[in-house]
Amino acid sequence: SPATAGKLLVIPMEGSHWLSMKEVLAELSKRGHEVVVIAPDSKMLIDSSGMYELKTYPVPFKKEEMEELM
């Protein structure tokens, strides 16, 4: 029998990992799962969406500094 929808907490890494994971999260959301994504304030690729809730937390460096290092 099919599983029931549940809650999913996601703490992704930047880069291609996130790009692949984003599609999976969208599909899980369509199937009724409640998805919460936690990311640092300095996130580069991780963005908000209607498919999941995005929560951020403070870090001691800015997005620009991260982009410069990458």
Image (cartoon, rainbow, N blue to C red):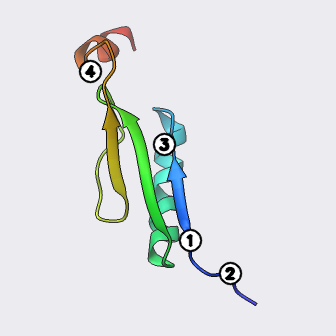
> Do the numbered discs 3 and 4 sit on residues whose CB atoms are within 8 Å?
no
* Distance in Å between CA atoms under marks 1 and 4: 32 Å
| 30 versus 19 height, above or below | below
Residue sitting at x 45%, y 70%: 29
Q: Nearer the viewer, mark 4 or mark 2?
A: 2
Mark 3 or mark 4, earlier in chain: 3
Residue sitting at x 42%, y 48%: 37
Mark 1 or mark 4, earlier in chain: 1
- Residue on which disc 4 sits: 63
Residue 35, picture quadrant: bottom left
- The amino acid on which the numbered mark 3 sits, given as a three-letter code, is Trp
> Do the numbered discs 1 and 4 sit on residues whose CB atoms are within 8 Å?
no
Q: Nearer the viewer, mark 3 or mark 1?
A: 1
> Do the numbered discs 1 and 2 sit on residues whose CB atoms are within 8 Å?
yes
* Distance in Å between CA atoms under marks 3 and 4: 17 Å
- The amino acid on which the numbered mark 2 sits, given as a three-letter code, is Ala
* Distance in Å between CA atoms under marks 1 and 2: 9 Å
- Residue on which disc 2 sits: 3
Disc 3 packing (10 Å; few <14; some 14–19; many ≥20): some
* Distance in Å between CA atoms under marks 3 and 2: 25 Å
- Residue 27 vs residue 4: left or right? left
- The amino acid on which the numbered mark 1 sits, given as a three-letter code, is Gly
Mark 3 or mark 1, earlier in chain: 1
Secondary structure at badge 2 equals: loop
- Residue on which disc 3 sits: 18
- Residue on which disc 1 sits: 6
The image position of residue 42, as x and y in percent, is 30, 25
> Do the numbered discs 4 and 2 sit on residues whose CB atoms are within 8 Å?
no
* Distance in Å between CA atoms under marks 4 and 2: 39 Å
Residue sitting at x 36%, y 41%: 46
Secondary structure at badge 3 equals: helix
